[in-house]
Amino acid sequence: MPVSEVTQKMENIHLTADDNEVTRKMKNMHLTADDINKFPMTEELNSFLNLDYMIAHPPWKDIPWIYYPSKQYDHRPPLFVYGFGLTTEELFQYAVDEGLSRGKSYEEILQDATAAGSASTRALRHMQANYKARGMMTFERAASYHANIVLTFWDNYTTSVPRYEEVNDVIDTMEKDWGPPRWYLVNEQDLRLRDYRLKLLTT
């Protein structure tokens, strides 16, 4: 995704399911990929394929198999990307720390839309150069309560990663500054589609 698109206004996505349904799903927020992978092929598995659940779940260390595409089940889940998730505040603070913005604080940058766009663009380009990640790292907007943008290396539709060893070296370096990478849902979904149900599930 071009940097100019990433730096456009990042809007939060809010849950739209009724309160009882959301409350039920929130009880499963602690489940890991390993936990979900142990579920049988029943209707219960589809509760994890609801867009509201995927937005609200914390970033994944690994994603469950149901978040990968499958020809066998004619299944095309939404896009997840692997990388480092940043909040808008973290992105702007990086711009301040590196002297990339006229604004001297996150709050000051927020007051000027032009300055905010410029700071975001400069920060993202600087990261690509600073971490020697050009041609390896892209940027995506996150559909998450935990991050606004993701410094991305591959996604759940990726079948191979060019220059894999070099990419892993970059990830190892960035991990020292940003913590471990995670999987994030991308904010490019058709919000009218709330369920990505698997077919051929037994009840």
Image: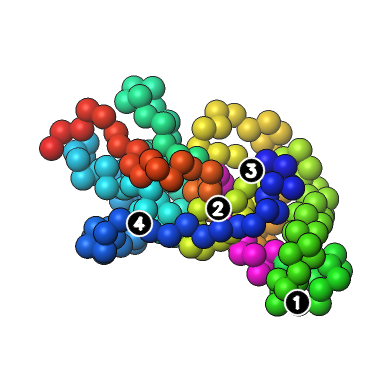
Mark found first going from the N terminus, 3 or 4: 4
Label 2 with label 1: CB-CB less than 8 Å: no
Callout 2 secondary element: loop
Q: Nearer the viewer, mark 3 or mark 4?
A: 4
Task: Examine the image and state in which quarter residue 163 appears.
Answer: top right
Mark found first going from the N terminus, 2 or 1: 1
Q: Nearer the viewer, mark 2 or mark 3?
A: 2
> Looking at the picture, how far across and down is residue 105, in whole percent?
76, 77
> Looking at the picture, how far across and down is residue 188, in whole percent?
53, 43
**On screen, residue 90 above or below 82:** below
Judging by the rendered image, the residue that carries numbered circle 4 is: 16
Point out the stretch of residues depicted in magenta.
80-91
Judging by the rendered image, the residue that carries numbered circle 2 is: 142
* Residue type highlighted by circle 2: Ala
Judging by the rendered image, the residue that carries numbered circle 1 is: 108
Q: Which mark is residue 153?
A: 3
Mark found first going from the N terminus, 4 or 1: 4
